[in-house]
Image: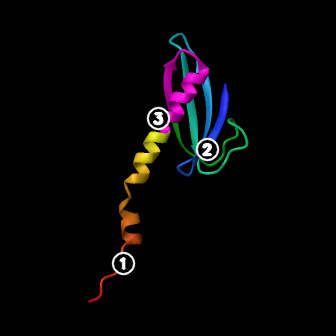
Amino acid sequence: MEQITGPVHGYWLACYTVPSEQGHYAYAKLCIAAPDDVWEANFAVRKVGAGPCTDPAEAIRLLVERTTSRLARKAAQPSEWMILLESTPTAR
């Protein structure tokens, strides 16, 4: 099974599943631009996975849910650079 989901907190997920003896695993390439297809997903910055699950759709659902949660936590924690960029200079 293949699926492209997004944008999710500014990223696109190029998802696919792989069957195994334990169940179905889902993997996704986390992309900064909308990919044309799962296998030619350019601009991937990370690969994530989830499973095993009883069926491919459940594996992708779990993967998207976990990735969305992680990206939300990341967005809620500004980096040091964002704090510097958003701070206003103090008068001396």
Binning the other alpha carbons within 10 Å of mark 1 as few (below 14), some (14 to 19) or many (20 upward) gives: few
Find the residue positioned furthest to the right: 36
Q: Is mark 1 on a helix, strand or loop?
A: loop
Amino acid marked by disc 2 = Gly
Work out how far the residue at label 1 is from the one at label 2, CA to CA, in angstroms.
Answer: 33 Å
The residue shown at (41%, 49%) is 74
Q: Does the magenta stretch include residue 61?
A: yes
Q: Residue 83: where, in percent of width, then height? A: 36, 66
Q: Which residue is rendered at x = 61% and y = 33% of the image?
A: 15
Q: Which of 10 and 45 is in front in this view?
A: 10
Residue 32 at what x, y percent from top left?
59, 51
User: Whole-Å distance between the Cαs marked 3 and 2?
Assistant: 14 Å
Q: Tell whether position 65 is magenta.
A: yes
Name the residue tied to disc 3: 66
* Amino acid type, mark 3: Arg
Image position of 29 with respect to 54: above or below? below
Q: What stretch is highlighted in magenta?
A: 49-67
The residues bearing labels 3 and 1 have C-alpha atoms spaced at a distance of 35 Å
What is the three-letter code of the residue carrying label 1? Thr
Residue 40 position within the rendered picture, expressed as x and y whole percent measured from the top left? 70, 40
Q: Name the residue under label 1.
A: 88
Q: Which residue is the site of mark 2?
A: 6
* The N terminus, quarter of image: top right
Position in image of residue 55 (x %, y %): 58, 17
Mark 3 or mark 1: which comes first in sequence? 3
- Asked if the residues shown at circle 3 and circle 2 are in contact, with their CB atoms under 8 angstroms apart, the answer is no
Q: Residue furthest bottom?
A: 92
Q: Few, some or many C-alpha atoms within 10 Å of disc 2 (few <14, some 14-19, many ≥20)?
A: some
